[in-house]
């Protein structure tokens, strides 16, 4: 039995504090159809202090829908952004592979668009300034926009000017007035968080110089479906994008998706470039991906129902494996405390009876407890001195790096359990 939590259904959701969507975020049609319920869940980044453990934890429904008109996968329940992003425990720079990734993005921007020296680059949802620091190293002028005050402080300390604000038209107008138009507006891992996609794109377009480019990075819905990455579903992620719905969205602003490339980050993402049509013709990659999405069945409801069935089967397989290992007396911990880990732990009801603790490199998370299942979070040093038998790799998107980094643990008999797409033990 789980030790630390009451059944989530027993807690009332603060209904007055949230909105429920009846129309699709992109096409506006009233054709949202639910295909998966991950149950009432706590907020995935709401790591709790010891003091907070004593208080009632807010739970919200986590139901996933697809619009059967434009086929955008989305959550209908909208938790107010102030609840989720005023303080943020995720630091981009805490994951070394992400630092490399953003160095690559800065180099890509410079190679493709040759922005003149000191061109203004706006990063929306700039987190701790990891990307803009790289852009500045190329001689570009960076300005971040970031709602979480705690991470703004980290960005400023590394020399990245950052506005502490939610991005909207008013902020865009202010930036244009004070700094001029931007050569590029970059939004990585933030677009999925945006409820009002129209307001966001309108503000980004307002910011862009005539020949400016809007660069988006979003997790790719095809990867989520193919690799059973259901744990990337949490309240912060309101939309799960394919290329096709994005082309429809940009079209409404007279913008055109001119190129798309696939990326490894966050379990498989896409980098999408949107420009005014006269600036560039779309590359072949755009039409190819749209065609592949159709061939993959993204325009068929059964595809999503099948995904939901596979998610339920995975839950049984994973919890069965953990129970079996525990019955043999094995010690198991969680490796990484990503937000997605909390979807997995809560949906599968994996608590301290299975995982003794989880470790993570993010200092803000240390000494706290995972939302919902209340598993304590420790620094990596704990894992290195403790050497448990198994580590459930909650940060599976960094599997390559982590398996390399923990070679000594593995040589000494330690094993990793990679949970998706099928629980898999790596020695
Ligand atoms: P990430 O998968 O980037 O994000 P999300 O929270 O959106 O699911 O989070 C990875 C987490 O894993 C982050 O908290 C840092 C942690 N981490 C480690 O603990 N060790 C590591 O070696 C790496 C690469 C990450």
Image: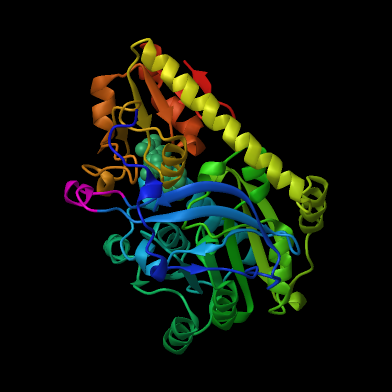
Residue 345 visible at all: yes
Place of residue 271 in the rendered image (x, y in percent of width and height, measured from the top left): 62, 56
Residue 145 visible at all: no
Residue 13: image quadrant is: bottom left
Image quarter where the N terminus lies is top left
Q: Residue furthest front?
A: 10
Place of residue 52 in the rendered image (x, y in percent of width and height, measured from the top left): 21, 52
**Which stretch did the figure color magenta?**
47-55
Placement of 104 over or under 133, stated as above or below: above
Q: How many marks?
A: 0
Q: Nearer the viewer, residue 298 or 311?
A: 311
Q: Nearer the viewer, residue 256 or 220?
A: 220
Place of residue 370 in the rendered image (x, y in percent of width and height, measured from the top left): 32, 43
Placement of 241 over or under 372, stated as above or below: below
Residue 163: image quadrant is: bottom left
The residue drawn where x is 59% and y is 80% is 202
The residue drawn where x is 37% and y is 74% is 165
Q: Nearer the viewer, residue 89 or 307?
A: 307
Ligand 1 visible in quadrant: top left
């Amino acid at each position: 039995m789980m030790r630390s939590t009451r059944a989530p259904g027993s807690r009332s959701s603060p209904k007055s504090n949230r909105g429920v969507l009846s129309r699709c975020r992109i096409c506006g049609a009233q054709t949202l159809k639910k295909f998966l319920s991950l149950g009432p869940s706590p907020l995935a980044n709401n790591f709790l202090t010891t003091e907070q453990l004593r208080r009632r934890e807010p739970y919200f429904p986590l139901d996933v829908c697809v619009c059967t008109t434009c086929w955008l996968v989305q959550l209908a329940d909208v938790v107010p952004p102030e609840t989720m992003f005023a303080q943020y425990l995720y630091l981009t720079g805490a994951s070394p592979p992400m630092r490399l990734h953003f160095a690559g993005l800065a180099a890509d921007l410079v190679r493709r668009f040759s922005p003149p020296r000191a061109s203004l680059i706006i990063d929306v949802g700039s987190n701790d300034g990891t990307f803009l620091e790289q852009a500045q190293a190329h001689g570009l002028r960076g300005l971040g926009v970031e709602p979480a005050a705690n991470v703004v402080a980290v960005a400023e300390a590394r020399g990245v000017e950052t506005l502490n604000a939610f991005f909207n038209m008013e902020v865009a107008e202010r930036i244009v007035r004070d700094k001029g138009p931007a050569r590029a507006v970059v939004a990585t891992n933030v677009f999925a968080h945006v409820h009002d996609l129209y307001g966001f794109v309108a503000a980004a377009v307002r910011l862009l110089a005539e020949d400016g480019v809007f660069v988006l990075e979003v997790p790719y819905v095809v990867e989520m479906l193919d690799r059973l990455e259901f744990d990337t579903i949490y309240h912060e992620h309101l939309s799960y994008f394919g290329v096709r719905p994005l082309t429809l969205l940009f079209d409404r602003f007279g913008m055109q998706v001119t190129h798309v490339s696939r990326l490894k980050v966050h379990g498989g993402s896409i980098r999408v470039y949107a420009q005014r049509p006269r600036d560039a013709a779309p590359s072949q990659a755009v039409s190819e991906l749209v065609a592949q999405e159709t061939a993959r069945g993204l325009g068929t409801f059964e595809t999503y129902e099948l995904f939901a069935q596979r998610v339920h089967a995975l839950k049984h397989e994973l919890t069965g494996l953990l129970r079996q290992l525990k019955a043999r007396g094995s010690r198991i911990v969680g490796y990484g405390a990503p937000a997605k880990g909390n979807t997995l732990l809560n949906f599968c009801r994996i608590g301290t009876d299975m995982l003794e603790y989880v470790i993570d490199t993010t200092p803000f998370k240390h000494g706290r407890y995972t939302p919902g299942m209340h598993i304590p979070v420790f620094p990596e040093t704990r894992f290195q001195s403790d050497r448990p038998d198994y580590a459930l790799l909650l940060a599976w998107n960094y599997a390559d790096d982590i398996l390399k980094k923990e070679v000594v643990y593995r040589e000494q008999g330690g094993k990793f359990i990679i949970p998706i797409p099928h629980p898999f033990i790596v020695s």
